[in-house]
Each structure stands twice: as C-alpha cells, then as structure tokens.
Amino acid sequence: MSDDPRSSNGTFATEMLFELKDVSATESPLDQDHGGPEPDQFSTVSAKPIGVRKPFKEVINVSMGDLHTSGLKPLSFVRQVLAACLYPQLVNSSRLPVDVRQRAQRLLGECVGGSIGSYTATAGIPEVVQRISEFITRRDGGVPSSPDNIYISPGSQWCLMNMLKVLVNSESSPRTGVLTPVPSHCTTTSSIVGLGGVIVPYYLTEENGWQLQVEELQRALDSAKGICNPVALYIINPGNPSGQVQSRKSMQEVIQFVRENRLFLLADEVYQDLVYGEHSEFISYKRVLAEMGPPHADTVELASFHSASKGFIGECGLRGGYVELVNLDPAVMKHIHTLFSTDSCAPVLGQMALDLMVNPPQPGDPSYPLDDMEREHIRKTLVHNVKRVSEVLNSLPGFCCQPVEGGAFAFPRLFLPPKAIQKAKEMGMQPDTFYCVRLLEEAGVLILPGCEYGQKEDTHHVRFCILNPQETMEEVLRRISCFHTQFMREVS
C-alpha cells in the first residue's frame, strides 16, 4: 500500500493531515446523510434536454441505504403501534391486535399529558431509555448497562456529531485528529473537518475482505506525528460501505490499541441487525470490552451508536438513534448532558420507534406470527441479494466484489482500462464517477462512485444498496451486466 493514497476527493491523504480543508472540499453533495446522497444532485451531472429517448422506462435508484424507499415494506407491528399513538382512539379499536393496543397505551402513558406532542426529558422518555438499557444487557450476554449512560437523539449521526464536538478542540495546537476508516461514508469526515479537526485515514484491507489490521492503525497513528494530536478512533461495524463484520479477535486488538495509545473509541454499530455472512456474527464493542476484564474494561472510553433507521425496522424518516457511553469521567458526562440539552429532545415518534426496535413481539404475542414472517421475508431477500450480487459481479470481467458479510451496501472494485481512465480525465471526472454517470445515462441505474468514500490510489469502486426487493435487485444486476459488457468493449 502506498504511503500517500488518495482520499475521497482525489487529494493525497498526507494533504488531509497537513492542511485543513473547508467543509465543501471534503463533503460531497452526493452524500449528505448517513445512508446516502440526494440523487437529484447526482443526476444533474449528466443533464440532457428533456425529451431525449432512453433505452429504459425508469431510473432505479440504489444509491441510498433506505429500506422503505427501495420498496421493502415497513413492519406492520411498528406502524400499527405508531398509528395508535398518533390517533389514540385506535387504542380502543378491535381492528388492531390486542398487543398493539397495549403497547400504544403504555407508550402514551409514558408521555407527558398522554400525548406524543409533548416534550420529553433530554435523554429521552425515561421508560424507553430504561428498556434500551435492558435490550443492551440482553444483547451483550448480561453485561450491565445503565440508563444514566444512554442518550436518545434525532438519529445516530446527531449523537456522533455531538461526541465529536466534545472530542475536537478547534483552538488546540496541534489540531485534534481522529483516525477514520477508508472507505467510509463522508458525513462523519465532513463533521470532523467542519469542527476544525484533522482526518487521520486508516485503510481497510480489501484483499482480506475489507478487514481492519491493527498494523495499519499503527501506521496511521505514526503518520500523524508532528501534524496533529489524535484523540479518537472511529470504527464502523458492520462496515459502510465495505460490508465487513469484525471478528472478536480483531476487536480485542483494536481495544488493546486504543488503550495503549489513550484513544477514545467511537463505535458506529447501526447495521448490527444486518449480518449475512455464514460464519459472521455481530458482537458489540461494549461486550468485548467488558469480557476482556480489567484493566481494559474499566479504563477504555467508549461511545457506541445505534439507530432505528437501519436493520429490519428501517424507519429512516422518524429520526431515532441513541448513544451509550462507557467509562467517561463524571465531569465529562455532565458536559455531554448540557450539550445534548441544547435541542430539547429527540422526536417522540423516533423514540417510540427505538422502543419497538429493541422490544419486538415475542412468541405467544398476537402480533408475533406476522412480525416474524415479515422479518424472515426481509432476511431471506437480503441473503438472496448478497449471493446474487457476488455471483453476477464476479462473473463480469473488470469487476471484483468482496463478500458482503453485513450492512446495506456492496462496494465492488472496478478494473478500468487506460482508455476509460483517459476519457474520464478529458471530461474532468474521476474514473469511477465517469462510469457511474455513463451507467445512469445509458442504463438508468443510479449508483455512487467509490471516490466519494475514499479508496487507495489508482483503485476504483462503486457503491450500491442491497436492501431491495429481489425483482429490483435482479433488474439492477441485469442492467449493470448489459451496460458493463458494452462499456468494457468500447474502452478496451
């Protein structure tokens, strides 16, 4: 690997360390949110006169990690409970299952004045926060979780942004650095730069299934000497856009690394429910840390993030996420409480969505059979899509797709001929952007270029969402296959 690999905007990684870019230089308009970009802005790159005939009837947008936009249906139990909370008369309606009405009645009873229109406590509805704490304890095999350490927010990115505000000192000299994975969604990198921090990139190993190597973390840390003061390590597990799932051994190595180097650990775990690899299993950093025991378990500072936008629930628009904080100094916790209080409270519907995410119907509940069937349908659909993406793309010359073990995206590598790279250069585009524009114009498929997420120098990738109905995924793969074959023939 080169010591000066290119960043997502085409500049060298060493420039990211030496020179503070303004936000517009690192934040692409293609990717304004955690899950993906505004597709309309991407389509303007290839604006054509209205009325130009295309060989497709509609554009298929697989650029965003939005379960419901893609066509997969919301979970009935979630929507029924939320409907009854919005319109309480439904609580007495026999048209809804009894457990739906009971859940809605309980949630309304926990709202001030019995209404979702009321403010809540800064950290969230206390009873909901308590149930999130209980969920974490169950998930982590009995590792204790305190509701005092949990804050509900308008999405996990809001939590992460506030934690970065605590960690990044814009007036310090040298400037504050945050070790950040490449590839990575650029919302976080934009936040770091916008706060006056410095991105210290570490590169996931593509040829090893995008796994994280602690030796690479050390290389990245060493590269920051004399340039910035690294204070935190940001991890995405399962990966976005890379789709890897970390092993327990890898996580233990990371925890050892952050302890030795006195780094704060930021664990983005929003895709924890979406794991497909046959031998893959999601384990939280909180659990691994606790099971390592002292001195790690009681000294490593950790913030872990989760969201109602991802997983089977997929309620992106309701804006509900949370952060759990581990081993923070009481004075810092007090400051965080003050910081989180500036926006009153998270949207109440988002808080309720989190409650429904961590407490789904159980066997014996009236809603369980339907809920279980709907979740199993989504799971089988995604497993099918992962398999088909790998089969189809790896059969095409010029594509190489690592196994997608988890998350919402595939991030295959493109091996583009010199002629394609030259054409892109003539048009003032990165090569993978050129490919994506051509795919959009000629096949009507909207995907995103890897240069928006960071990649090694002279490598090219594309990112697209796999959270789609099977028929949509098959049509996307058919269009990509037809376009790619013709494109490679043209530029070879």
Image (cartoon, grey):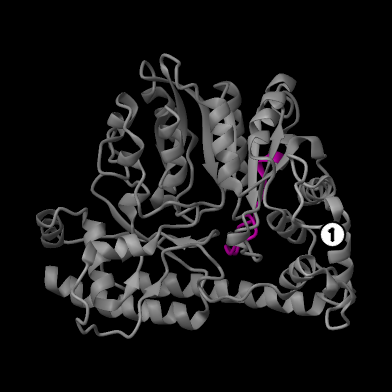
Query: Mark 1, residues whose alpha carbon is within 10 Å: few (<14), some, or many (≥20)?
Result: some
Q: Is residue 470 above or below residue 234?
A: below
Residue 70, percent from left and from top = 50, 72
The residue positioned 32% from the left and 45% from the top of the image is 8
The region drawn magenta spans 272-286
Q: Secondary structure at mark 1?
A: helix
Q: Is residue 263 above or below residue 422?
A: above
Residue 330, percent from left and from top = 74, 22
Type of amino acid under label 1: Leu
The residue positioned 47% from the left and 39% from the top of the image is 213
Give the side of residue 451 with respect to residue 315, left or right.
left
Give the side of residue 375 with respect to residue 186, left or right.
right
Assess whether residue 277 is covered by the magenta stretch: yes
Front-lying residue, 492 or 6: 6
Q: Quadrant of residue 272?
A: bottom right
Q: Quadrant of residue 300?
A: top right
Residue 431, percent from left and from top = 21, 56
Residue 75 seen in the figure: yes
Q: How many marks?
A: 1
Assess whether residue 197 is covered by the magenta stretch: no
The majority secondary structure of the magenta stretch comes to loop
State the residue position of label 1.
Answer: 108
The residue positioned 45% from the left and 16% from the top of the image is 172
Instruction: Work out which quarter of the rendered image holds the C terminus and state it.
Output: bottom left
Residue 257, percent from left and from top = 56, 28
Q: Is residue 186 above or below residue 63?
A: above
